[in-house]
Amino acid sequence: MTPRQNRNRDRADRGIPEATVARLPVYLRALHGLQDRGVATVSSEELATAAGVNSAKLRKDLSHLGSYGTRGVGYEVEYLVYQISRELGLTQDWVVAIIGVGNLGRALAGYGGFASRGFRVAGLLDADDAIVGEEISGMAVEHIDRLEEVIAERSVSIAVIATPAGAAQGVCDRVVAAGVTSVLNFAPVVLSVPDGVDVRKVDLSIELQILAFHEQRKAGGPDGYGDGPPGPAHYVEAVDA
Amino acid sequence: MTPRQNRNRDRADRGIPEATVARLPVYLRALHGLQDRGVATVSSEELATAAGVNSAKLRKDLSHLGSYGTRGVGYEVEYLVYQISRELGLTQDWVVAIIGVGNLGRALAGYGGFASRGFRVAGLLDADDAIVGEEISGMAVEHIDRLEEVIAERSVSIAVIATPAGAAQGVCDRVVAAGVTSVLNFAPVVLSVPDGVDVRKVDLSIELQILAFHEQRKAGGPDGYGDGPPGPAHYVEAVDA
DNA sequence: GTGACTTTGTGCGCGTATTCACAAGGGTTA
DNA sequence: TAACCCTTGTGAATACGCGCACAAAGTCAC
């Protein structure tokens, strides 16, 4: 009898670095790809390449979960998939509600990546009467007035906010009051929430702006030439407008 | 004559930390909000609160751009907006093409946050003949066969990939070959590109998985009880088969 | 003009993340 | 069984990001 279970517990115990957690889903996806191709075993080098990271980083990340590799061989794909899934909590089902059924909300509702990873969309809600009742991806849109009922009745544990910016904080307050402690926010605002509630933000325009910054750098520095029109002049002049 | 221009150059020069760059768009948004409310001057404390960060961090971030504040007073909103915009490269127009006009592509095409920040969507492309020709947000969808022409003729500098996973790498190779060096990828795959090309990834399901991890932790550790079905059993037993 | 007050800009220490490089461990072959 | 090869897991060094706390620098009241 090897004391493997104890070994696992030792490490898996509290305290996986946040940076590692953020990469686990990437590894998981790469592993699923290997699984589909019938690969049974993979080395850290191969997996790292597939996931787009350094192999030492991959090994250190995995070491936080436990000692799941075999020296001289690598990692068994299926087993690793199971362990990462378990660590991320994907072995259980998560019930998701999407609030705001505009273009983005529809895209999210139809996104296949959810269902296949243990996320079940159990509610689509919107404030617009023209949309309420419409059927999207086999699910009827409900009125936002029913938000609290939907969350309670269907045990929603994750709220996805895809409303316009102006409505986001209000919706957020309501879902938090209804007991939700995990929020994925697509609205371009900084949500404020009480301690104990996790908010993650996905912001399309921010990503573009970061790209623009680097693109500009490639082209040769901010604004290319000179440093600037408006200048600090209006500190002196425009102030008395 | 204050030597302000030199001072600015000293700092703005190469080397703004990546973490800072990622926050500049957030500050910029907060500043625009203040501008809309007619606020002329803001302290680092106020702005930091609006942006959801620590005020010392905000000041340090801004100090990388130059010395744009006034001690005892704060920052002039309009001037700061201009400086951050310039640093991010938003004072010039960026031409964007969206490839893949499914639900997500449509959402992106209609996203107001682009136009208002200097990003102009100049092309919508898709491989599906049923979609080609359709008009979305005032723009006709073109066939992916015309990808290279569109990029060249309209000087596209940023490509947004919103295709299914399987098509993403192929599309990426083509846009890179056509001279694009900035890619925003929504497809759930790791794109490989040559040096000099920037890729940023937005992945909806990864964000959800990170939330699930934390949610699980709140509920009391991985899997709650025991540690697991499939287990490493076959490492011990199946080994001598 | 002077002193009190406010807010910026930053030096410094701390913790986290990344990477290198290698010893330890397991498989494999003769 | 023993020697060799391969890959993991990790110690140690380095780099990076964060936030405190304070001196410097400006404003404002009188």
Image (cartoon, coloured by chain):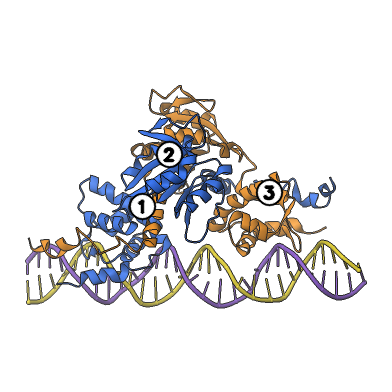
Chain colours: A blue, B orange, C purple, D yellow
In the depicted view, which residue is nearer to us: A93 or A42?
A: A93
Looking at the rendered structure, whether the residues under marks 1 and 2 are on a common chain is answered as: yes
The residue to which callout 1 is attached is A26
The residue at which mark 3 appears reads as: B34
Do the CB atoms of the residues marked 3 and 2 lie less than 8 Å apart? no
| Kind of residue sitting beneath label 2 | Leu
Q: Looking at the rendering, which quadrant does residue B233 occupy?
A: bottom left
Nearest to the eye among marks 1 and 2: give it.
2
User: Picture coordinates of residue D24 (x, y %)?
Assistant: 75, 71
| Secondary element type, mark 1 | helix
Q: Quick one: label 1 or label 2, which is nearer the N terminus?
A: 1
The local secondary structure at tag 2 comes to: strand
On the question of residue B179 being in view, the answer is no
Indicate the position of residue B15 as horizontal and vertical percent values: 58, 58
Q: Quadrant of the N terminus of chain A?
A: bottom left
Other residues around mark 3 within 10 Å, as few (<14) / some (14–19) / many (≥20) = some
Asked whether the residues under marks 3 and 2 belong to the same chain, the reply is no
Q: Label 2 is found on which chain of the structure?
A: A
Subunit ID for the residue under disc 3? B
Tag of residue A124: 2
Q: What residue type is labelled 1?
A: Val
| Image-based side of A22 in relation to B115, left or right | left
| Side of A92 where B177 appears, left or right | right
